[in-house]
Amino acid sequence: MIPERLDQLVDSLLWEGYALYPYTPGATKNATPTPFGIVYPPAYALTLPSAFDHLLLRGVLEAPPDAVVRAEVRFLTAAGDRRCAPAQRLELPGAMVGALAGAADQGLATEKQASAGGEGDSPVVVSLSLGARMAQPGVYALELRVENRTVVPSGLERAGALARSLLSTHPILRVNGGRFRSPLECDDASVNTFPVLATESDDALLGAAIVLPDHPQI
């Protein structure tokens, strides 16, 4: 289970830019949500240099080989009512970071593909994969990749693409028995997300949809 304070933080960030209260449900702001952290379907992302069909959360972990790493992604999917956006969560099983790094040497990674709620009868197809590489003894480079693999027709307009997108996407890496280095102090190469340390003990790395400092508070 994700720690309660981290869970509350992510819950708060999920709806940032989508439906901000104390606006009333009928307010203009909430009639036209402006989502952040969008992972579009591939066919639409190819049409715009500013659109992505994936995100990469990269981080540096200090830990022994038997430290257990867990990965998940939280996001919203569009519903018929534009103010409604059900929250979704996909998780990978925990794995020892040393085993992940060994698997990477063989070209393997922990991966999961699943469908989440989408507008109408067509679900959003999501791929989640986690890999690790030993940078030096006791230090690992981690990469969590989230992909939107939903098939949509070419020529789709933005409104149609958003109905098949991951909205307000927040990937999370956690570790038992180690600590993450601050992405603000590293040569971070994350894509389509802004990673920060999310807990006081530095055992969680959050890919935010907006720019935040380390250890953000609600």
Image (cartoon, helix red, strand yellow):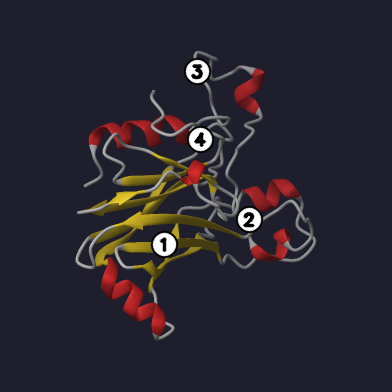
Instruction: Please tell me which of labels 3 and 4 falls first in the chain.
Output: 3
Q: Which residue is mark 2?
A: 40
Amino acid marked by disc 1: Leu
* Rendering quarter of residue 109: bottom left
Q: Amino acid at mark 2?
A: Tyr
Graded by Cα atoms within 10 Å as few (under 14), some (14 to 19) or many (20 or more), the crowding at tag 1 reads many
Label 2 vs 1, first from the N-terminus = 2
In this rendering, which labeled residue sits more in front, label 3 or label 4? 3
Q: Is residue 64 above or below residue 216?
A: below
Front residue of 8 and 194: 194
Q: Quadrant of the C terminus?
A: top left
Dots 3 and 1: beta carbons under 8 Å? no
Marker disc for residue 142: 1
How far is mark 2 from mark 4, CA to CA?
18 Å
Circles 2, 4 touching at the beta carbon (< 8 Å):
no
Name the element at disc 2: loop
Q: Is residue 72 rendered to the left or right of residue 79?
A: left
Q: Of callouts 2 and 4, which one flags the residue occurring earlier in the amino acid sequence? A: 2
Look at the picture and state if 58 lies above or below 100: above
Report how far apart the C-alphas of labels 3 and 1 lie in the structure. Answer: 36 Å
Q: Earlier in the sequence, mark 3 or mark 2?
A: 3
* Neighbour tally class for label 3: few under 14, some 14-19, many 20 plus, Cα within 10 Å: few
- Which label belongs to residue 95? none
Left or right of 60 in this view: 159: right
Q: Label 3, label 4: how many angstroms apart (C-alpha)?
A: 13 Å
Residue located beneath label 3 in the image: 21
Q: Assign a secondary structure to mark 3.
A: loop
**Amino acid type at image mark 3:** Tyr
Seen at 50% across and 18% down, the residue is 21
Q: Which kind of residue does numbered mark 4 sit on? A: Cys
